[in-house]
Amino acid sequence: MSRITRFAARDPGPAARMAGFVAHLRSNGLRLGVGETQTALAALTHVSACDPRETRLALKAVCAANADEAARFDLLFDSYWCTDGRVREKAVPREDKADRKSTNTRDPQGENAGARGALHSPGDGPDRASADGDGTGKLIASGVENLMRKDMRQLVSPQDISAAEATARRLAAAFRDRRSRRRRTARKGDQIHFRRLIRQSLSTGGEPLTLPRKARPDRPVKIVALCDVSGSMTIYARVFLAFLSGLMRADDSTDAYLFHTRLVRISEALRDTDPMRVLNRLSLLAEGFGGGSKIGAALDQFARGPARRFVNGRSVVIILSDGYDTDPPEKLAKALARLRKRGCRIIWLNPLKG
Amino acid sequence: MQDWRALQKGMADHGYIAADDLAMAVHIALSLGRPLLLEGAAGVGKTEVARVLAALRDTMLIRLQCYEGLDAAQAIYERNYPRQLLAIRAASEAGETGKDVEARIFSDDYLLERPLLQAIRQPVAPVLLIDEIDRADEEFEAYLLEVLSEFQITIPELGTIRATTRPIVILTANGTRDLSDALRRRCIYAHVDYPEPAAELAILQIRAPEIEATLAAQIVGFVQALRREDLEKNPGIAEMLDFAAALAGLGVNDLIHDPMLLQAALGTLLKTQSDREAIPPEVAARLAGRAA
């Protein structure tokens, strides 16, 4: 086939090419290790490696690890092995994807700045004009004023924290436990622990004198909280943040994130023992606080990134948000569906619902 | 090497039409001795692969159905406690010494083999089907990983049992939760999709040869069209075969002429109330008409 990539003359051989291909897949987000390169080479010895079609199918079986990757594999295969006879450079052609990614992360920041600017101008303009008009105008204006400063110390006061923290601790204790499906020895249980019964009865000549039982123990669930701090949420953010810090203190395994137009992990900051220092650190982290909201994008980022490591079937994900989103709702639905697949329970606390 | 073509043909001879990528994945898994992970919607014939492989290799099929809370006692081994108790009582009547009794009641005779242990103790390599692995919880997945990589199981009283033969392991999942990367990495992966019309027609003809060619084509066209509708639960291959059997039982020769009977047979394809409502008789008739 003429479409097949022509490799450079000094190319060291098939093993190196395979390593290059695996690196190419890896740079495109497939999670492969050295073991896969070996497996791929071993797999090729079992098919006719000269036939591109067979090679493609064989490598697909080895390298793809889920439905999404299997669907993308053909394109990735083409872009490495079938580049219309062009000589292969050392650089992988799709590597520009990494570049795009980095601009992506930079992008929201740019939009942040834009969003902030937009928030300033109504606050500065018409609101100030109406402030010396009637009382209701003043109310709105003061709300906007808060946004403009974006100072976390103004948003959260120590009294609020202690009140919300107490509530949070109670709540956290209430939904922390989930009944495990496994059984272990317990004084009172619904099943007899036969394994132990036999062991104990040996000492009494086969007479089972005591009946050890087993029950399902409660196992703690892990709480992951995501708090929306976009412009529309500012008036609730203070309470929610206090609530979060209460949750964090109640349980070591809890994880917390802030999101507005992007996602920021605040677990370490919230665990700080000094409440005022917490706020200082938060102010630094929460750049873009009170800006626009991209719930869909933020949740998607969460579901693809941290959720992979921290969320499992024993997790409860709490989302604190009013649901005002600049992204299309489908994106949010997709992100939630993806998150749901991790097997966690999702609780959406919406302040607008009262 | 055309081994995988031969394998594909062998599977077809046993009544399973495998797509190219599935056949290749099975071939690679068999030749490398790695577990095969099959993923896909319910009713696309994932479990069937294991059955066919067992038939093809002429070995036993050992099946482990996973569910939440599955533990070692149900997956690996359990002692036959009632029998042990009886033996202890009998031994004390006969005046046997404690040591002998102990040696006896913890021997092999009092061990109930569960699928995993059973699979590695077979004289001929069996096919081990671990069905719906995504339903089991993560602790079990982690344990399974160990068994699948070493093929050995440790029982405290008997010591480590090494596999006499390496079973052919097939895992199926339908994506109720994501599997761990570690497990995925150990396996050869294939995504099983609903078959193409031609393949589905071939399946129908193998499984129900008594159905006429025109009706078979209509059935496949109708089911394929139904899958394109926005349904909660897409009809799988098993449902399609049920549908065909129902039509044959009702004596239908043509889907278009009998809207009443078509509606009656739809119960084999649409299994939820909302899906039934989504496909009223007119829509069904239209789909059937287009399929013809």
Image (cartoon, coloured by chain):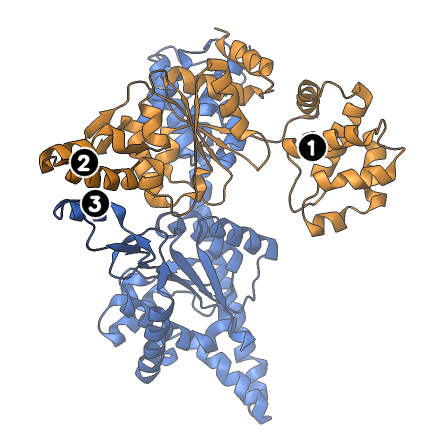
Local secondary structure at mark 2: loop
> Is the C-beta separation of discs 1 and 2 under 8 Å?
no
In the displayed structure, does residue A169 sit left or right of residue A334? left
What's the CA distance linking mark 3 and mark 1? 49 Å
> Is the C-beta separation of discs 2 and 3 under 8 Å?
no
Question: Dot 3 corresponds to which residue?
Answer: A198
Chain where mark 3 sits: A
Which chain is in blue here?
A
Task: Return the x and y of residue B100 as percentages of the image width and height.
Answer: 12, 32
- The earlier-in-sequence mark between 1 and 2 is 2
Question: Dot 1 corresponds to which residue?
Answer: B242
Vertical arrangement, residue A157 with respect to residue B90, above or below: below
In the displayed structure, does residue A146 sit left or right of residue A140? left
Q: Report the front residue among A129 and B76.
A: B76
At horizontal 54% and vertical 84% (from top left) the residue drawn is A140
Local secondary structure at mark 3: helix
Question: Dot 2 corresponds to which residue?
Answer: B156
